[in-house]
Amino acid sequence: MQSFQPPRRILMGPGPSDVSPRVLSALARPTVGHLDPAFQDLMEEIKAALARLFNAPDYACVPLPAPGTAGMEGALMNLLEPGDRAVIAVNGVFGGRMVDMAGRAGAEVVRVDALWGEPVDVAAVEAALASGPAKVLAFVHAETSTGVRSDAAALCALARRHGALSIVDCVTSLGGVPVDAAAWDADVLYSGTQKCLSAPPGLSPVAFSPRALEAIAARKTPVRNWLLDVSLLMAYWGGEGGRTYHHTAPINALYGLHESLVALFEEGQ
Ligand SMILES: Cc1ncc(COP(=O)(O)O)c(C=O)c1O
């Protein structure tokens, strides 16, 4: 067996995107322990930077230790309990994946299809929300499979009006086009590191609103996914009252995410 030398490519596809050299060199810095005081300072900086990037000042913002699909799974599994009604907009591949996941969470899924290549149909979503109380409205902000952006502000406003929690997939949009949790009054947003953040795949930045955290605290059943259970995760990432071991954080991947956020803010988000 020999060391792997990847070919040099220019990545122009829908992800992963090219990783900036400064992020690659940050990844190679010495590994410290996941409870090292220096690492804990880094965690706090990452949380603050993600809150700035999502414009989610009062939200719980952390990177989940797995790619964008983990953000999707974390959002749906934390908010949904068996029997909950979830309205899910589908205008491409990733809306379809949300439908599959919400069904596995035991939810009663109301699927609202739009033509691929078109944005989510706001009027059709409104009709679905009006047809019965839903706990969640989920949609993809920028559907990677077609390149189409949907109107997140209008869809989150609909969710508020109908008493549903909004889940916004920002895997392709975060860092590329404006994402504004506070202005949209969105509840859960998730993304990935491998697209507009120009970091390698493997982490999923998420933001949970105070309203979403309240809904999670009021669950009658435990979250079905242990790794992505936000209450357990926040006992490690939250920092208040000490950090409780939950999983061994992907230390070097977090160095990379941190460096990508430094670069992003230097460029002027
Ligand atoms: C809109 C959208 N959601 C979710 C995902 C899943 O992310 P990952 O492949 O990092 O798990 C992707 C990946 O391309 C995506 O484009």
Image (spheres, rainbow, N blue to C red):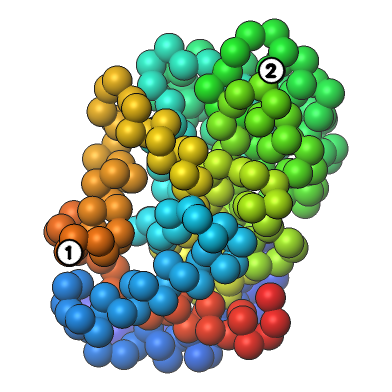
Q: In what element is the residue under mark 1?
A: loop
Q: Is residue 200 visible?
A: no
Residue 111: percent from left, percent from top: 65, 20
How many angstroms separate mark 1 from mark 2 (CA)? 41 Å
Left or right: where does residue 76 sit relative to residue 247? right
Q: Quadrant of residue 32?
A: bottom left
Mark 2 is on which residue type? Leu
Mark 1 is on which residue type? Gly
Please determine whether, in this image, residue 8 is positioned above or below residue 213.
Answer: below
The residue carrying mark 1 is: 242
Residue 159's mark?
A: none
Please determine whether, in this image, residue 1 is positioned above or below residue 211.
Answer: below
Q: In what element is the residue under mark 2?
A: helix
Of residues 152 and 163, the one drawn nearer to the viewer in this rendering: 163
Q: Is residue 251 visible?
A: yes
The residue carrying mark 2 is: 129
Crowd rating for badge 1 (residues with CA inside 10 Å; few <14, some 14–19, many 20+): few
The residue shown at (72%, 13%) is 130
Residue 240: percent from left, percent from top: 25, 61
The residue shown at (25%, 84%) is 38
Residue 123: percent from left, percent from top: 84, 23
Disc with the residue nearer the chain's start (1 vs 2):
2
